[in-house]
């Protein structure tokens, strides 16, 4: 959860002067720059800070959480949460540059973002910084990725919205995928920063009471948005398989984070059916040496929502595809995701040794060199 001036503080002079203000539109109706400032200043109140630090698990989330913005606090939070590793994404800062038509600003903003993420996570090896790599320009994307890796980022967030010009599977992007493969750095797809997360607004213009989203406002995710979240990611993964990127780069790994996983069984079946139906006519499909679903099984991992039936997913697709995620300190992770997943796995008959893939082993596979 970024302070208001976080991105600017890591930007070069040319970029800093052009960055948009931090947008909190996805943070619910009560999220304001003043609230962010007050949560940042809370660190100067020893009594309130001690109260939050005493019970991280049951404490507030979002900007109010202990360790949401302060790296040293995050170390203490991890001690209580018991996580051996945590992927750390930014929340709102990509909105300050990602939508600009100024490509220099887009990549200058991404560089600032990646410097900031690497710095935040430098205090503890359990914190794994996620860099951000825009796809506006293939060669600059390679430069951005290379810089992020050199800074110490452990994964690279690739926007999965509708491409601006050409598909990420175009040969112009081969150097990017080769860079990630050679460095042993996974690409990750994640909620936000792609512009295609939510149901089109016109579907919400229904003459009915929309209610509030689960973070207290009306600007974030609601029920119909939830049904639409994963489609752009599904399209990108399908293209990476069918256009042969995972065939060409067998060491390229992908984590699909905070986009749910209930859609994965159908994706795998549909990919196999697509080759069965069209394989005789499309030259690129003839180059595939495995079933399409096997590329997903080999190279992609998914985090279910805490309310999804993770046990059913493991039983349906196999134990190697799914990862635990708390989404802490965001509220989307629920109050007790560990127990929810424990119950789901047990109810589906997933034994303890097999469940270790979900809790740890599949994550280690994703990040193996």
Image (cartoon, helix red, strand yellow):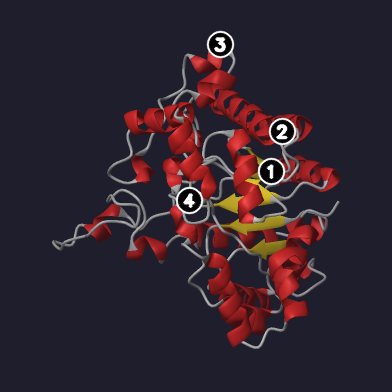
Residue 284 in sight: no
Q: Disc 2 to disc 3, how far (Cα)?
A: 24 Å
In the image, is 48 to the left or to the right of 68?
left
Q: Disc 1 to disc 2, how far (Cα)?
A: 7 Å
Q: Disc 4 to disc 2, how far (Cα)?
A: 21 Å
Where residue 129 appears, x then y in whole percent? 67, 40
Q: Farthest residue to the top: give it.
A: 13
Mark 1 vs 2: CB contact within 8 A: yes
Residue 87 in sight: yes
Where residue 143 appears, x then y in whole percent? 72, 29
Name the residue carrying label 4: 330
In the image, is 205 to the left or to the right of 251?
left
Q: Which mark is residue 127?
A: 1
Q: Residue at x 70, y 62 (%)?
A: 300
Q: Is residue 214 above or below residue 304?
A: above
Q: Circle 1 — which element? A: strand
Name the residue carrying label 2: 122
Q: Circle 2 — which element? A: loop
Q: Residue at x 34, y 33 (%)?
A: 35
Among the 4 quarters of the image, the one containing residue 341: bottom right
Q: How many marks?
A: 4
């Amino acid at each position: 959860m970024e302070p208001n001036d976080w991105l600017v503080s890591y930007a070069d002079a040319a970029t800093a002067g052009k960055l948009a203000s931090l947008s909190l539109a996805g943070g619910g109706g009560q999220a304001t720059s003043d609230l962010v400032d007050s949560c940042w200043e809370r660190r100067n109140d020893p009594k309130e800070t001690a109260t939050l630090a005493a019970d991280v698990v049951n404490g507030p989330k979002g900007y109010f959480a202990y360790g949401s913005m302060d790296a040293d606090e995050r170390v203490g939070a991890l001690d209580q949460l018991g996580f051996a590793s945590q992927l750390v994404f930014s929340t709102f800062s990509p909105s300050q540059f990602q939508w600009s038509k100024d490509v220099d600003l887009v990549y200058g903003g991404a560089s600032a973002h990646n410097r900031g993420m690497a710095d935040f996570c430098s205090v503890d090896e359990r914190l794994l910084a996620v860099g951000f790599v825009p796809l506006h320009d293939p060669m600059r994307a390679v430069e951005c990725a290379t810089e992020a890796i050199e800074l110490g980022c452990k994964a690279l967030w690739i926007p999965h919205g509708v491409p601006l010009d050409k598909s990420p599977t175009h040969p112009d992007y081969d150097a990017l995928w080769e860079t990630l493969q050679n460095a042993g750095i996974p690409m990750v797809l994640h909620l936000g920063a792609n512009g295609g997360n939510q149901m089109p607004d016109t579907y919400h213009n229904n003459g009915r009471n929309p209610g509030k989203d689960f973070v207290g406002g009306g600007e974030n995710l609601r029920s119909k948005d939830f049904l639409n979240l994963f489609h752009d990611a599904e399209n990108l993964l399908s293209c990476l398989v069918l256009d042969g990127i995972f065939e060409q780069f067998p060491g390229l790994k992908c984590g699909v984070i905070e986009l749910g996983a209930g859609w994965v069984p159908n994706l795998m079946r549909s990919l196999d059916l697509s080759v069965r139906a069209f394989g005789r006519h499309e030259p690129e499909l003839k180059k595939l040496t495995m079933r399409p679903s096997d590329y997903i099984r080999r190279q992609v991992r998914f985090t279910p929502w805490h309310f999804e039936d993770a046990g059913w997913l493991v039983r349906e697709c196999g134990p190697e595809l799914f990862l635990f995620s708390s989404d802490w300190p965001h509220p989307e992770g629920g109050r007790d995701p560990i127990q929810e997943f424990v119950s789901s796995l047990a109810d589906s008959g997933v034994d303890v040794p097999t469940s270790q893939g979900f809790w740890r082993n599949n994550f280690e596979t994703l990040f193996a060199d």
